[in-house]
Image: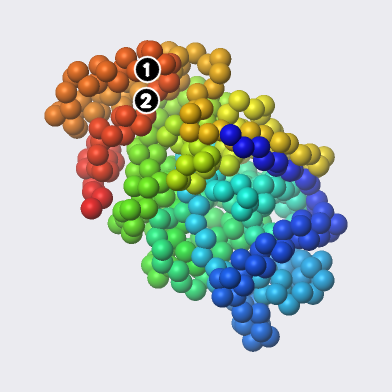
Amino acid sequence: MIETTFEASWEETPGRLWRQRFRRAWPAYREWFLRGGGDADARATTRARRKLEAAMPELVPIYERLVELAGGDRWAERFLTLHDPPPFACACSQTVWRRDDRFALVRNYDFPAELSERHFVGSRWLGRGVVGVSECLWGLDDGMNDQGLAVSLTFGGSRAVGEGFGIPLILRYVLQTCGSVEEAVEALRRVPSHMAYNVTVLDREGECRTVRLHPGRHPVVTAEPHATNHQHPIDDPAYARRTLSLERLRHLEIQAHAPASSLDAALERFLESPLHQPTGGERFPTLYSVAYDPVGARAVVAWPGEPRWTLGLEPFPTERRTVRLRGAQAYSVPGRAPARRGENGAAFEHQLRLVRVHRPAVPDGLLRDIRRDLERTGRVPWERLGELWGDAVWVDGSEVDRVA
C-alpha cells in the first residue's frame, strides 16, 4: 500500500496556476522527451506547429499562451505541440453505465503514480467549461465539458508508432470543440493519433461510441460501450494476457447484463478485481476511478476505502488529497455486504450461466467450489472465473477471436 497525493484546481485561462504546474512537471517531461529522441531545432518546431495549425487550429491561441508562460523555452515550444511525442502506454478500463434513463462514462486509469501529474483541472478555455485529468501539461486522459460530452481513453495494445499527435491533446481538442458524439467522432476520424488507443465518448443525449485509433489504419467507429487494452485483430497477444485485457473486457460485458442500480454502485464495481489493479504487481496499477455524469454535470472520483471526490463544471477551490493505493491483497472494501447479495452477485450468476453454456466441459464440482469461495469470503472470485474461459473472446455469445 502506498500513499500518493492528487490535486484539483480551476483556472479560467492559462496563467499563474498553469505556470506553477509547468515548473513542477517540466524537468521530468523534458527528460522523457529527450530520451525519446525529441528534436527541438527550428525546422522541427516549425513543422510541428504547422501540423498543429492544420489539424487543431482552434487550439493555437492556447498553445501560444502556454509557450509564453513557459518562458519561450525552445524545448517546451516543441514539446507542447505534442506532435510525434515519444511512445507511451497505459492500461485502463472504461464503460458506459446505463440504468433506466440514467447513464455515465465510468473508467479506471491504470498507470504508475510517479509518472502521472495526478491533477484534476477545471478551465474555461475558448469559453467552454472543461474538467478532466491533466496529461502532458495541457492534454487530458479523460474529462467532460459543459455541453455534456464525456471522453476517456484506453491504450490499444499495439507497439506501432506513426506520425500524429499524442492522444491527451486530441482528447483536449475534442472537449474544447465538440458538443455531441457525432462531432467528437468526426474530430477523432480527422486528427491523427501517433499510437493505438480506444476512445469512448458519451454525450448528454445518451449517445455513445468507441473509436479505435491506430497509426496507419483508418479509425474504426463502433457502438461498443466498453474498452480495455486490445483491438481486433489483437496486435500483441502477450500484452493482452499480461494486462488481463480480455478478462477485463469480458467482465464489463457481463456486468452490462446486470447493471448497477446507481452511479455510485457502478463506480464501486470499478474498485474491485479484475478491473481494479493493485500496486506492487507486474501490471499497471489503478491510479484512480472516475465517473463522468453528463446530465448531473459532475465528475465523481473514487479510490477503495476513501471518501468520494466530486468536481463540477463551475469554479471550485484548489484542493489536495492524499490517498492510499491498495496492494494485491486488499481488493474488497471493508463493511460491504457479501457480493452474492449485492450488485456484483447478479453479474456473477450471469457469468456462471454463460460458463455452463459455452464451456460445458467445466465440471459442475468446480463451479460449486467457486460459489463456495464467494459464500465464504463475500468477494466475487473473478480471477477464478477468468481462468475457466481460457483465451477465448466472446461477443454476444459467439466466439469471435482467439489469442495465439
Instruction: Give the crowd class for mark 2: few <14, some 14-19, many >=20 residues within 10 Å.
Output: some
Above or below: residue 133 compared with residue 351? below
Q: Is residue 376 left or right of residue 96?
A: left
Residue beneath label 2, please?
Answer: 381
Going 61% across and 69% down the picture, which residue do you hit? 33
Residue beneath label 1, please?
Answer: 374
Total label count?
Answer: 2
The single residue placed furthest to the bottom in the displayed view is 43
- Horizontal and vertical percent position of residue 342: 45, 16
Going 43% across and 16% down the picture, which residue do you hit? 378
Of residues 2 and 224, the one drawn nearer to the viewer in this rendering: 2
Q: Is residue 159 left or right of residue 393?
A: right
Of residues 380 and 180, the one drawn nearer to the viewer in this rendering: 380
Which quarter of the image is occupied by the N terminus? top right
The Cα–Cα distance between marks 2 and 1, rounded to whole angstroms, is: 7 Å
- Horizontal and vertical percent position of residue 122: 74, 47
- Horizontal and vertical percent position of residue 317: 82, 40
Going 50% across and 37% down the picture, which residue do you hit? 278
| Residue at disc 2, secondary structure | loop
Assess whether mark 1 and mark 2 are in contact (beta carbons under 8 angstroms): yes
**What amino acid is at disc 2?**
Pro
Give whichever of discs 2 and 1 has the lower sequence position.
1
Colour theme: rainbow
